[in-house]
Image (cartoon, rainbow, N blue to C red):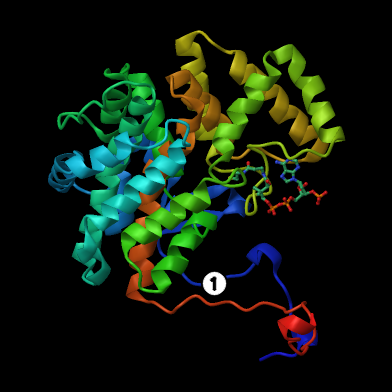
Amino acid sequence: MADSKDIVVRKGLEGVVIDSTSVSKVMPDINSLTYRGYTAQELCEHCRFEEVAYLLWNQQLPNASELKAFEKQERDLRALSDPLKKVIAQFPKEAHPMDAIRTGISFLGMEHPEAFNATEPKDILNHSIEIFAKAPTIVAAAYRLRNGDQPIEPKADLSYSENFFHMCFGEVPDADIVRAFDVSLILYAEHGFNASTFTTRVITSTLSDVYSAVTGGIGALKGPLHGGANEQVMYVLKEIGSPDKAKAWLEDAIAQKKKIMGFGHRVYKKGDSRVPTMKKYLEILSEKKGDKKWLEIANVLEEGMVEKKNIHPNVDFPAGPAYYLMGFPIDLYTPIFVMARITGWTAHYMEQFENNRIIRPLSEYVGEKPRKVVPIDQR
Ligand code: COA
């Protein structure tokens, strides 16, 4: 054990390399992000989200027949059990949808007690696909029930993204809107040892099951400094209300030293590599919906933040208004992020499990010096 004078505290684990990974690489210097060696931008250009999920789990992109088999497995698993449906129907209507998906996945784990003993990679993969397939059904069912609507059953002839629109709204929008959503899922799928992925790896390192790891990841993602930022961005854009008010709002926020949601990143300091792709789709959506207000407010904030603070937007910044234009209620944005990130979390579960050592860091003690307990009648 080191003397306290030798201890270097790395608050927030900044700069600490805690393990190796082959899942993804964040390269802030060249503003790039790769999943299993492929850039996220190129994956967005050429692939559907299901192909990327397959890639993260199987290290390779699928060929046509592999994709077909994988999609059949995922589509066959989408429906929820009756007990799970009943649990969702009892969720408090005012609960945040992140609590709904966290509890839903936790309950799903109770339906799979065998996962606690799963050590074979193929079994862990099957449990991961189970979570992946049912997460959108849980999110959509909880959303509809809180509005007093009946849940809509999943449809096996729709893609992952199309089916989510169908289960939320009873219809699938046009292909450009579905594509924008699919691209957001690809961009949200994986991002190195971020807070929620690290949480899932810590849970995995105790040899807990994959449902517990994902449930913990959801808890970490909910916070506004992490995934919850995509919701906060939209609340800010709505608070500002119109492009002509954006400059004054920003100046005031900077003067008050407020954190502006959707800006800044622990790893990227010169801009988030995912932003240009997501922004392109935000522009497409704004054009398509004939509603450019949010994009214009966002542009004023982006220019001002870069000019005055040299702080760039992260992917949550364009994702928030993009989901708004797709018609989702604001508190569904982070659960959508969950649906995407399940792929990355579970890929990390597999990697950690295969080559495990329990994660157990140290701390510098700054509390009381050793002292005697005074019995209660003398205190
Ligand atoms: N708005 C205003 N100032 C910001 C900022 C933001 N969004 N993000 C960082 N800064 C400033 C900090 O105030 C700090 O300034 P200081 O050195 O004068 O105190 C400096 O930049 C470093 O920020 P810090 O919070 O220490 O960075 P971090 O690496 O610990 O945190 C985030 C990274 C992402 C948590 C942080 O940038 C943040 O809170 N962003 C808003 C939430 C968000 O969008 N999260 C999604 C991340 S993908």
Image height check: is 318 above or below 373?
above
Q: Ligand 1 within 8 A of label 1's CB?
A: no
The residue at the point 60 percent across, 40 percent down is: 314
Please state which of residues 102 and 25 is positioned toward the viewer in this rendering: 102
Disc 1: which residue: 18
In what quadrant of the picture does the C terminus appear? bottom right
Image coordinates of residue 238 in percent, x first then y, are: 63, 20
Image height check: is 244 above or below 326?
above
Q: Quadrant of residue 236?
A: top right
Q: Quadrant of residue 301?
A: top right
Image coordinates of residue 109 in percent, x first then y, are: 28, 56
The residue at the point 26 percent across, 27 percent down is: 151
Q: Amino acid at mark 1?
A: Ile
Would residue 192 appear left or right of 50 to someone viewing this image?
right
Few, some or many C-alpha atoms within 10 Å of disc 1 (few <14, some 14-19, many ≥20)? few
Would residue 361 appear left or right of 203 to someone viewing this image?
right
User: Can residue 212 be seen in the rendering of this structure?
Assistant: yes
The residue at the point 27 percent across, 27 percent down is: 167
In what quadrant of the picture does the N terminus appear? bottom right
How many numbered discs?
A: 1
Q: Quadrant of residue 88?
A: top left
The residue at the point 47 percent across, 32 percent down is: 94
* Circle 1 SS class: loop
Image coordinates of residue 112 in percent, x first then y, are: 22, 58
Would residue 299 appear left or right of 136 to someone viewing this image?
right
Residue at the limit of the structure toward the right, as seen here:
255
Image height check: is 300 above or below 214?
above
User: Can residue 194 be seen in the rendering of this structure?
Assistant: no
Image coordinates of residue 289 in percent, x first then y, are: 46, 11
Residue at the limit of the structure toward the front, as seen here:
377
